[in-house]
Amino acid sequence: MFKLYTAPGTCALASHVALEEAGADYTAERLDFKSSQQTTPQYLAVNPKGRVPALVTDRGTLTETPAILAFIASSFPKAELVPDDPFAFAQAQSFNSYLCSTVHINHAHKMRGYRWAADETSFADMKRKVPETMAASFALIERDMLKGPWVMGEQFTICDPYLYTISGWLEGDGVDLAALPKVAAHRKRMEERPAVQKVLAAVKA
């Protein structure tokens, strides 16, 4: 059985949905970021990075969303969460890497400027930039990367819960979802999936 460490409003939602879609045997433990539970010695023993997600397996703990998603897909091949074709699989990894290394970082500038600067006036400047950078990133996704109806086209893959998770931050980042009809339709399509509904109900419980 796997154990997923998660927290509300974080990118860990993508891994949670992927586990459910795969039919994995898992438990989910929610951390309270408001009380800094992610920095306690107990959790740092699990993930020294002090972040989520972290997936505990019988072979050790995995961190970083793209790695966890790829592991889930590889562990449950019958779920067909990645394309069989090596080039298409690399494209899926490229998409998830973009979400991780660029889009998530854009979002994080809103509330975690201290990671990149020491002067608090810089924090405000970073925060002001977030609507612009997030809108630009999602305009690229809308125009060139989201094939439809799913990210990779007709096949639902590990890209879809990740896109769904990060697109859920857009309104809070000051981005008008009306300018992104394909992304908005993708979000609606995701919320119709039983696995997503089950995870959202568990998150809200």
Image (cartoon, rainbow, N blue to C red):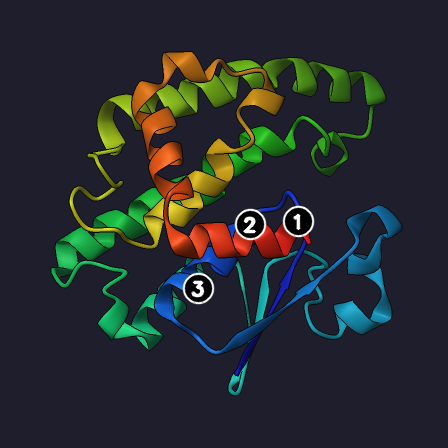
Q: Where the C terminus falls, by quadrant?
A: bottom right
Question: Alpha-carbon neighbours of circle 2 within 10 Å: few (<14), some, or many (≥20)?
Answer: some
Name, please, the residue furthest toward the left.
85
Name, please, the residue furthest toward the bottom.
58
Question: Alpha-carbon neighbours of circle 3 within 10 Å: few (<14), some, or many (≥20)?
Answer: some
Residue on which the image places disc 3: 20
Marks 1,2: beta carbons within 8 A: yes
Spatial CA distance of label 3 from label 2 is 11 Å
The picture places residue 113, in percent across and down from the top left corner, at 72, 30
- Residue 200 has which mark? 2
Q: Residue at x 67, y 20 (%)?
A: 126
The picture places residue 140, in percent across and down from the top left corner, at 32, 23
Secondary structure, mark 1, is helix
Spatial CA distance of label 3 from label 1 is 16 Å
Q: Quadrant of residue 185?
A: top left
Marks 3,2: beta carbons within 8 A: no
Residue type at the position of mark 3: Glu
The picture places residue 168, in percent across and down from the top left corner, at 52, 33
